[in-house]
Amino acid sequence: MDGLGFWKFMAAGSVAGMVEHMAMFPVDTLKTRMQMLATSSPNHAPVGRFLAAIVRSEGPSGLYRGIAAMGLGAGPAHAVYFAVYEVCKDRLGGNRPDGRHHPLIHAISGVLATTASDAVLTPMDVVKQRLQLRRSPYGGVRDCVVRMLREEGLGAFYASYRTTVIMNAPFTAVHFATYEAVKKVLGGITPENASEEQLLVHVTAGGAAGALAGAITTPLDVVKTRLQCQGVCGADTFSSSSIIMAIKKIVAKDGPRALIQGLKPRVLFHAPAAAICWSTYEAMKSFLQRRSHETSLP
């Protein structure tokens, strides 16, 4: 596995996840706000004007509410994500020295990785989403956690887990398969010894993978957001965590267009986020490989 142990993949993944989410957090806040609006809402506006309205009414800090929750969740979740992916890819034969691309292996490995990762991230993602809402009733991460436990119980933290896994399974399958495919194509025309060129490959492949996967899974992301924020700031509540039931209720009230609310900021988030994440991850892997090689020398 590239000469790295399980814990080193976890370390590289943790750093990559933290960098990705911290850098792109304002765009994530924008996406959450847009997905919670009805399509007929007078506050619904193009992305640029919507962003300007948040800054004008709440200041720049309004774009960063909930970032502490994401900081607590992203590191451990991405550590699990990349470590499971690398191990599964290796065990399933994705690292065979035949020089061929194995999209099915990469896709399966990605699905297994995100299923494990989502179990770690979902509770903090729920807290993050609720804090991102305009006029959020919570004073911070601790207040949100305590009040949710007291008023809604532990299950509230996992109300969207099934939706998250169902959304992230195709997201990750498309994401990893696209990333590995684009990396292989670009890598074939890029000098292996040119680190600047290799960085460009990771950035381009990551950006393409993130944009495509993010766009395809937007409707399920809308459902996830609505389930996570139900009952907060006057938002609708759902009688169960059924995806079909949630989709029917959203469409009945807000129309089919509601299922693609936040498409632009979601793509704007995932394209650069994936580029940042993959380039950071690959850089960390290279760094740890060099350190491992140096320490093994007599």
Image: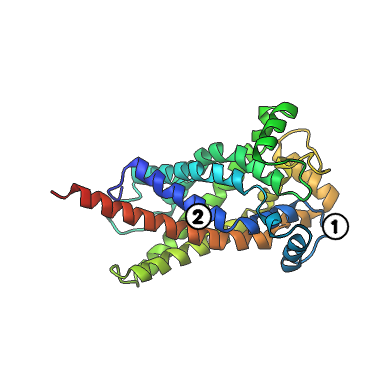
Near mark 1 (Cα within 10 A), the count class, few <14, some 14-19 or many ≥20, is few
User: Considering depth in this image, is 240 or 101 the residue closer to the camera?
Assistant: 240
The three-letter amino acid code for the residue at tag 2 is Val
Q: Is residue 19 left or right of residue 64?
A: left
Q: Residue 88 location in percent, x, y?
A: 39, 42
Q: Which badge, 2 or 1, comes first in the chain's sequence?
A: 2
Q: Secondary structure at mark 2?
A: helix
Near mark 2 (Cα within 10 A), the count class, few <14, some 14-19 or many ≥20, is some
Q: Which residue is mark 2?
A: 19
Q: Residue at x 49, y 41 (%)?
A: 76
Residue at the extreme left of the image, as rendered: 298
Q: Secondary structure at mark 1?
A: loop
Q: Residue 24 location in percent, x, y?
A: 58, 58
Q: Is residue 78 visible?
A: yes
User: Considering depth in this image, is 224 or 57 the residue closer to the camera?
Assistant: 57
Q: Which residue is mark 1?
A: 41
The image's colouring method is rainbow
Q: Residue at x 62, y 63 (%)?
A: 268
How many badges with numbers are in the image? 2
